Image (cartoon, helix red, strand yellow):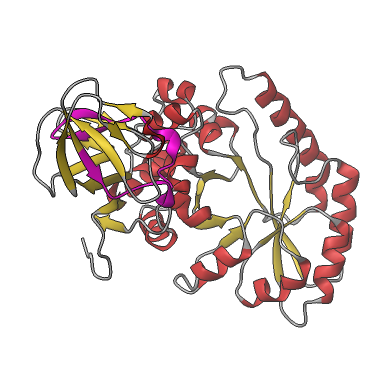
Amino acid sequence: MDKAGYHRDTWAEIDLEAIRHNVEEIKNHLKDKEVFAVVKADAYGHGEVEVAQAALEAGATTLAVSILDEAIRLREHFSNVPILVMGWTNPEYADIAAQNNITLTAFQTDWVHQANEHLTDQDLSIHLKVDTGMGRIGIRSVEEAYDVIRACDRTNIFITGVFTHFATADEPDFKYYHQQLGAFKQWLKQVKPHLPDSITVHIGNSAASMRFPNDMYDGVRFGISMYGLYPSKHVKEEQTILLKPAFALYSRLIHVKKIQKGDAISYGATYRASEDEWIGTIPIGYGDGWIRKLQSINVLINGQKHPIVGRICMDQCMIKLDQSYDVGTRVTLIGCEQNATVSMDDVADHLETINYEIPCMLGKRIPRYYINM
């Protein structure tokens, strides 16, 4: 690991071999489908450039992001790889996308007219987004689709793909998934004769691609599971493919002390020792995204679980130890150590949220080191 430029005793390790493994797993599962590597939000906090490179090495063919700025940064590193922006982009930036050979998402007739006004001689590729029940963005009817398609006539805007997004593909009840799938099939049956023969159709997120491989069209958008995280407990229990987590979070003890029964720890004196105890301090806090609600979660030292006690501070937090440890001893906040694990799912459960949120909330102040490059 190259630690040049960093001077912290808190860090994350990103296993790029795990990224490659997960992409290969979904490719083997889907056989002949194209894999879009979803690297939005700095690759879910893992590092967009490094993850994108690993995913492409494993056979992904397209990079998918949420905003144009993400796509432009990636274009600086990947000159010939297709890049799709899945969110809405202001039409006044259509020329920037065209100049950088970046595909945008479209679903509004007015957007097409306005984007075309900003294009000169460049061709702009777009994918049509269809809202089959997610309720965020997208074309809601066949008539809307016809309007958008007609708006592209005699312009430099070319439709090269269509897609939708499933709201409940990770749930135990498949009813709404099949409702959305049926709506998309009906929409596509009516609209496809008006689209180029070469369009790419992609409907699957991680959950849908793992659970319903036979429903997928030309490609899938592999997001959360590319990072070794299952979209839900239901999908994890099915173990359709074996994923390897790519993210681990570590710190080191910077201070160890023995306190007396009744002594208080941290702001508000919310924790008081019930007996004489060993307390360790580590340099991570809510300023890094290790938020105060993580008080009482366990971390690992030498394979043993130790709880965080007292309120988590902006830059530090304290751990109740079972004995004295040397300053510099490694602490695992997320990851495996000996036979013990604190998983991303454990942290998410503690916060009553989803595993997607955890790596995204851990800030840039925590350096990412890449292993198995």
Q: Residue at x 9, y 35 (%)?
A: 324
Start-end of magenta stretch = 280-307
Can residue 55 be seen here? The reply is: yes
Question: Within the magenta stretch, is there residue 284?
Answer: yes
Q: Residue at x 33, y 45 (%)?
A: 247
Q: Quadrant of the N terminus?
A: bottom left
The answer to which image quadrant residue 297 occupies is top left
Q: Residue at x 50, y 71 (%)?
A: 80
Instruction: Pick whichever, 122 or 277, lies toward us.
Output: 277
Instruction: Pick whichever, 204 or 90, lies toward us.
Output: 90
Residue 69: percent from left, percent from top: 59, 67
| Figure disc tally | 0
Residue 34: percent from left, percent from top: 51, 49
Can residue 152 be seen here? The reply is: no
Question: Within the magenta stretch, is there residue 242?
Answer: no
Residue 229: percent from left, percent from top: 41, 36
**Above-or-below relation of 45 to 333:** below
Q: Is residue 294 left or right of residue 83?
A: left
The answer to which image quadrant residue 331 occupies is top left
Instruction: Pick whichever, 78 or 88, lies toward us.
Output: 88
